[in-house]
Amino acid sequence: MKKPSASMNEMQHDAKVSLKKTAGVNVPKEEKKYRPSIGTTEASKNLGVQVIKQGKGEKSQGEVKQLVIDKIYDEADRTLKGMARVAGGEGELPCEKVYEDEGVLAFYDKYPDAPVHILVVPKNQYISYDDFILKASAEEIVWFFKIVRKVTYKYNLEKTGYSSYKKEGFLITKFGNLVDYVINWARSGSLWPMTFGLACCAVEMMHTASSRYDLDRYGIMFRASPRQADVMIVAGTLTNKMAAALRKVYDQMADPKYVVSMGSCANGALDDIENHLLFLRDDEKCRFELLIDIFGVDYPDREKRFELIYNLLSVVYNIRLHIKLQLDESDTPPSIAQIFSTASWFEREVFDMYGVEFSDHPDLRRILTDYGFKGHPMLKDFPLTGYEEVKELGNVVLFDISDGVPQGKALDIAESSPIDRLNVSIIGTNRYEDIKNSDAIIITAGVARKPGMNRDDLLQPNAKVMKEAGENIKKYSPNAFVIVVTNPLDAMVSVVHKYSGLSTNMIVGMAGVLDSARFCYFLARELDISIEDVSAFVLGGHGDTMVPLINCASVAGIPLTQIIDMGLITQEKVDEIVKRTRNGGKEIVDLLKSGSAYYSAASSVICMLESYLKDRRRILPCAAYLNGEYGAEGLFVGVPIIIGKNGIEKVLEIKMNSNEQEMFNKSVNAIKELMKSLAS
């Protein structure tokens, strides 16, 4: 490359010459003396060959070089003229070309009152340098930077020299290679940490800047002054004594600013998370009064598998804080629902998704998946295919006095377990001692109904069976939760309660769950809608006097009375459904000729059992002991109750209209008469 003029006037003159030439004005040869020449690179040789082919006759090497230079100037002038138009002017060009090779253009930038720059850009289909970096192939980028290095090195060091470079104020704005560009980009956004070493954890912080990790290469510079830092790395456990000093330093940092806790001691398990959170919430210098979220992270290959993260927000100081708690699979962190009201919901999500159980949680149950869902879907070892929902409430013992019957049924069910993926034990027995220490007992024993019989016809024979069952429950499983299914149900629950000695909260009768299900089914079929949208309650005795509550029934939240007013169903049809619900069991018995309902009754029992074993606290209509509720005392009557880990958690009293109350009282009186018959 030939040295261009060192005079600014001569540079301007050369730019005018180029403009005139582009406009079609003949330029004297002597005015081209400031044009730089190029070396015999491969690019220029190739270009020279093309020029020779276009010309006539043979040309010397010097003539070829001059043709190449002229061709480059013509292309450069067209480019510069286009740049002038973009700048909004038709006068003198804002820059002067210095050098061009295949696909590369270098020129002076001579805007008024601005230092002189040398810009090197790719002259190709790319609209800008950044566009070139993003879209060009690796080969194009490597070639381009080789040319750039040659231009900048030769021009600034060989031609102008360092002193001239410094005097004239030339700046090279685009040079180096792609790695330099990426590193410079990282440096431009790097953090400048404020060091705050409090203990041996400071050694860990120093390691980040040493040869193994060497964060300095990315522009991360540790600062001793908070006014020059934008992130504070607190290495070590912060004590109350040092807290005030750290806060003072933090307040002197400019926004935006961040704080990172570093070190094993400072970020290990928090045995006293509740007091930590109370302090962060209540201290005037913290005021983290909002719990934004609690979420988990699963690391199945790590010793402490789970990471529990609490996200706090201080609205007063506009600060966010993330607290990480590492847990083993068996760890049960304390619930913080008493500290932050939103924690109850978030902890239920973590339990549902990861299986982390929070001690003392007021209502720890699934919130996103169904109650019967098996497993926790956010675990990384959760199966993605072949998953089936199996309740697996516990191991099962089938008891019957008939030899071989329970054993055969148990074997039949057990042999289906590989297909159903059922990992529980199922055995059959004729010995009462095999029910020892059971968590729950379901009683279906007794004489079954036959066509032409009502439930009350079974009173005396089944009472003897219930007496025997109650005595053996008292002997082998006095702490079990008992569900009675045997008819006449309300009376049989009383018999089992009498002979088992169970507390009234640990024994119920399966009545209203099945009766309510029948009521919902008949309504849904008549309305031709989804069964899921129908909700209804049936109270009172499990017999002909049961009370389906029309005023409490609803369809997708719309009261059934309004559904009647809309004309979707008539009152007469509803009355027919009520009557059919009362006779639902008899209808099945008459159809079967031998035997009674099995499947619907079994589903009802499992619904009740699951609520107890898994503490679901579901509201279910069951035959429960009344001690003054609904005006009844000393009787088992079908009413809404909450079933949880303590059995009957609460009896719910709902308001009924005069007609419903009258029918309910009639049902209670029928149960009383049944109990009198039993006593006699």
Image (cartoon, rainbow, N blue to C red):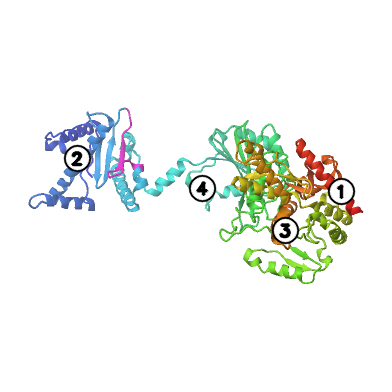
**Mark nearer the N terminus (2 vs 3):** 2
10 Å crowding of disc 2: few (<14), some (14-19), many (20+): some
Q: Which residue is mark 3?
A: 589
> Residue 35 has which mark?
2
Where is residue 565 shown, x and y percent of the image? 63, 35
| Residue positioned 12% across, 33% down in the render | 25
Could you tell me the amino acid type at mark 3?
Val
Q: Amino acid at mark 1?
A: Glu
Residue furthest out toward the right = 680
Q: Provide residue 396's location: percent of width, then percent of height.
A: 74, 63
Question: Foreground residue, 320 or 156?
Answer: 320
Q: Earlier in the sequence, mark 4 or mark 3?
A: 4
Callout 2 amino acid: Arg
Q: Are marks 2 and 3 in contact (CB under 8 Å)?
A: no
Q: Is residue 251 above or below residue 636?
A: above
Residue at mark 2 to residue at mark 4: CA–CA distance: 47 Å
Q: Find out whether residue 117 is within the magenta segment.
A: yes
539 or 348: nearer the viewer: 539
Q: In the structure shown, which secondary structural element does the residue marked by tag 3 occupy?
A: helix
Question: For the residues carrying marks 2 and 1, which lies nearer the camera in this image?
Answer: 1
- For the residue pair 532 and 307, the one nearer the viewer reads as 532
How far apart are labels 4 and 3 at the CA level?
80 Å
